[in-house]
């Protein structure tokens, strides 16, 4: 995959202020309704600059397909559509019966993610088809500037869904950045040349393809308990990736009910468009939380990698972590496993945890210092409705701010129903959420904004990550929503950038998470004062995001703007040591840019006064990276620190 094109002159900084802000809210249908078949194919045109989607029925057997192009260049070849239920086969021999078009437009705000305010305009077309036996299915398509999506709508009494025949057929010569599928979505991403595309899957449904028409990231949105999560399968030598449901289990549809399936989506455009896209959120239903004033993202000191089991069962240790978070200005401290087990045991819950727990004392202690407490829960504690209410109501009464819920390890329909129940309950009890061992966002953060982040990634805990994986995540997993990678574990000997503290520091910006769980020990931060100083400046949320340069699996440099106007920059590079020419597209005029890079004796901070219109040359070590912050320069200003 080619890197972003770079301007020709190095060493000065190009700074352009722009943002791709997207959103979706339903508009009223247009009066246009095409009830006759004008042919065997139909185009869906989006706003100016959008890709074009083409829905077609094969003239030989009536099987439906969808193709996507931009101009005369192909993004998706005609790709199979359809599904099979207990009552009907909608994968072929269909007849077109009508079409209705409308515009979907609106705006919304998000407390987490790449941007705070999002505006969108999509073109929607609903195609109606029937089988020879008279069974009906609607195909709903949407086209926006940064993507194409479709879903199926079934009337009542079609029975359970046995399988989908949906697939994505890529053009010849397509390259891929893709990862194997596992229930926790934590396997590594790898880059493949077109001649070496991976053999039979399964693969995660967050795969990036470099097509003749631009980048294409396959994903899904609006997955809930009416359906199951999906992944991709692939036969060696084929350019088609099929959509497979969880364990090939049927999707249960209650008798007398219809069904609207999740969106199958392709985020597409140049690399910056895909990376900055909010298309998956834009497709999702609007927020179901009316008052969101209690939802407050921000950095946290996460104690598991810092102290492990010993910290989990120790009030004294947790108070020390609270003290350290307060000194750094971090608004949260996360208490991981152990706090509700019997002292000295790790399998038995204290039956009197509500009265014997030291957690209320810790919450009071932390609140006095301006620090909120998040706590770890095993998901099984929240499966029974009565037990779920007991746990969540008690935590709310104590003053706990959020819950980290772990080990769901399934995207079955049953587990997605569990998510529905837990999302409603945590919203009702004003508890922010971090899902671990989990699904991936899939639009959930728009509908339930109390969800600050998900794991669903091979993160800092892993011992087998690669520099290639680190440089792939901004273009794959993190495109879809917040990602709890847990950066900052400078003391870990297993990280692929172990020789680059600057690269580790840059991940705290490169990877977006509504709660950025910083995984280092206080001792590791004290040993790196420049890292500590930088992390103390991290804002609670981001206003906008820009990809400055990148090449998936090889390098990534992103800038994110804080509410105070400063831009924080994080970069990671796989491979040999080099100098990276970074176009810092932040706006015109003069800027003060402070970089933090690896020096012979530790981290080095340097400041540059630059004008928009060029590059910043940043040295990085092998499999390394850097961090930076940029602010408007004024006479006498020597630091961006507020």
Image: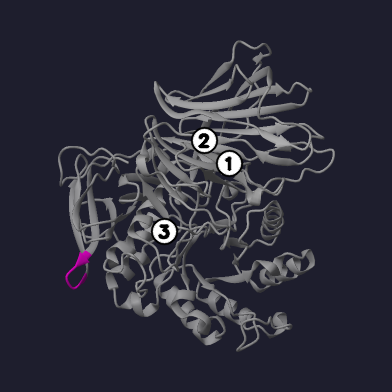
Does label 1 or label 2 sit earlier along the sequence? 2
Which of label 3 and label 2 is nearer to you? 2
Does label 3 or label 2 sit earlier along the sequence? 2
Q: Secondary structure at mark 3?
A: loop
**Residue nearer the viewer, 337 or 59:** 59
Q: In this rendering, is residue 95 above or below 262?
A: above
State the residue at coordinates (39%, 78%): 522
Find residue 19 and report its horizontal and vertical position in percent: 39, 39
Label 2 CA crowd tier, 10 Å (few <14, some 14–19, many 20+):
many
> CA gap, disc 1 to disc 2?
8 Å
- Check the picture and name the quadrant holding the N terminus: top left
State the residue at coordinates (23%, 39%): 6
Q: Secondary structure at mark 2?
A: strand
State the residue at coordinates (65%, 28%): 139
Find residue 216 and report its horizontal and vertical position in percent: 44, 37
* Magenta range: 598-602
Disc 1 and disc 2 in contact, CB within 8 angstroms: yes
Label 1 CA crowd tier, 10 Å (few <14, some 14–19, many 20+):
many
- Which residue is label 3 attached to? 539
- Tally of numbered discs: 3
């Amino acid at each position: 995959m080619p890197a972003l094109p770079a301007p020709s002159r190095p060493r000065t900084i190009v700074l352009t202020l722009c943002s791709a802000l997207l959103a979706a809210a339903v508009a009223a249908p247009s009066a246009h309704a095409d009830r006759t078949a004008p042919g065997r194919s139909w185009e869906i045109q989006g706003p100016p600059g959008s890709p074009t989607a083409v829905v077609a029925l094969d003239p030989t057997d009536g099987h439906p397909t969808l193709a996507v192009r931009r101009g005369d260049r192909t993004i998706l070849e005609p790709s199979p559509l359809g599904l099979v239920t207990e009552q009907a086969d909608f994968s072929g021999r269909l007849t077109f019966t009508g079409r209705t078009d409308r515009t979907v437009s609106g705006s919304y705000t998000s407390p987490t993610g790449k941007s705070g305010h999002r505006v969108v305009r999509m073109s929607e077309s609903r195609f109606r088809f029937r089988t020879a036996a008279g069974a009906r299915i609607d195909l709903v398509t949407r086209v926006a500037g940064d993507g194409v999506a479709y879903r199926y709508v079934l009337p009542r009494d079609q029975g359970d869904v046995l399988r989908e025949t949906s697939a994505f057929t890529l053009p010849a010569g397509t390259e891929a950045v893709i990862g194997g599928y596992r229930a926790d979505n934590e396997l590594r991403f790898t880059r493949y040349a077109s001649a070496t595309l991976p053999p039979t899957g399964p693969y995660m449904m967050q795969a990036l393809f470099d097509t003749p028409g631009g980048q294409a990231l396959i994903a899904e949105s609006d997955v809930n308990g009416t359906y199951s999560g999906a992944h991709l399968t692939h036969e060696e030598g084929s350019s088609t990736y099929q959509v497979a449901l969880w364990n090939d289990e049927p999707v249960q549809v209650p008798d007398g009910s219809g069904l609207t399936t999740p969106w199958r989506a392709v985020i597409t455009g140049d690399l910056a468009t895909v990376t900055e896209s909010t298309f998956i959120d834009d497709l999702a239903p609007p927020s179901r939380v009316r008052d969101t004033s209690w939802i407050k993202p921000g950095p946290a000191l996460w104690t598991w990698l810092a102290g492990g089991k010993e910290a989990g069962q120790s009030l004294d240790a947790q108070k020390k972590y609270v003290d350290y978070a307060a000194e750094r200005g971090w608004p949260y401290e996360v208490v991981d496993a152990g706090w509700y087990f019997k002292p000295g045991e790790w399998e038995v819950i204290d039956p009197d945890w509500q009265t014997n727990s030291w957690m209320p004392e810790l919450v009071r202690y932390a609140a006095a210092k301006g620090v909120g407490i998040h706590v770890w829960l095993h998901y099984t504690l929240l499966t029974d409705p009565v037990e779920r209410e007991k746990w969540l109501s008690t935590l709310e009464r104590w003053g706990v701010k959020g819950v980290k819920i772990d080990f769901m390890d399934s995207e079955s329909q049953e587990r997605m129903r569990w998510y529905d129940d837990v999302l409603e309950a945590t919203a009702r009890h004003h508890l922010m959420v971090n899902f671990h061992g989990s699904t991936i966002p899939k639009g959930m953060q728009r509908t339930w904004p109390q969800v600050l982040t998900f794991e669903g990634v091979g993160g800092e805990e892993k011992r087998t990550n690669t520099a290639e994986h680190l440089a792939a995540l901004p273009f794959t997993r993190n495109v879809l929503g917040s990602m709890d990678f847990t950066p900052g574990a400078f003391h870990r000997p297993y990280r692929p950038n172990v020789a680059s503290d600057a690269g580790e520091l840059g991940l705290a910006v490169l990877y977006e998470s509504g709660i950025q769980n910083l995984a280092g020990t206080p001792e590791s931060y004290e040993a790196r004062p420049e890292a500590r100083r930088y992390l103390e400046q991290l804002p609670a949320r981001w206003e906008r995001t820009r990809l400055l340069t990148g090449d998936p699996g090889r390098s990534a440099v992103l800038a994110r703007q804080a509410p105070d106007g400063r831009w924080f920059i994080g970069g990671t590079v796989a491979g040999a040591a080099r100098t990276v020419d970074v176009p810092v597209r932040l706006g015109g005029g003069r800027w003060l840019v402070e970089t933090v890079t690896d020096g012979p004796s530790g981290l080095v901070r340097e400041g540059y006064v630059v004008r928009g219109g060029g590059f910043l040359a940043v040295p990085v070590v092998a499999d390394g990276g850097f961090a930076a912050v940029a602010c408007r320069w004024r006479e006498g200003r020597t630091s961006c620190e507020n």
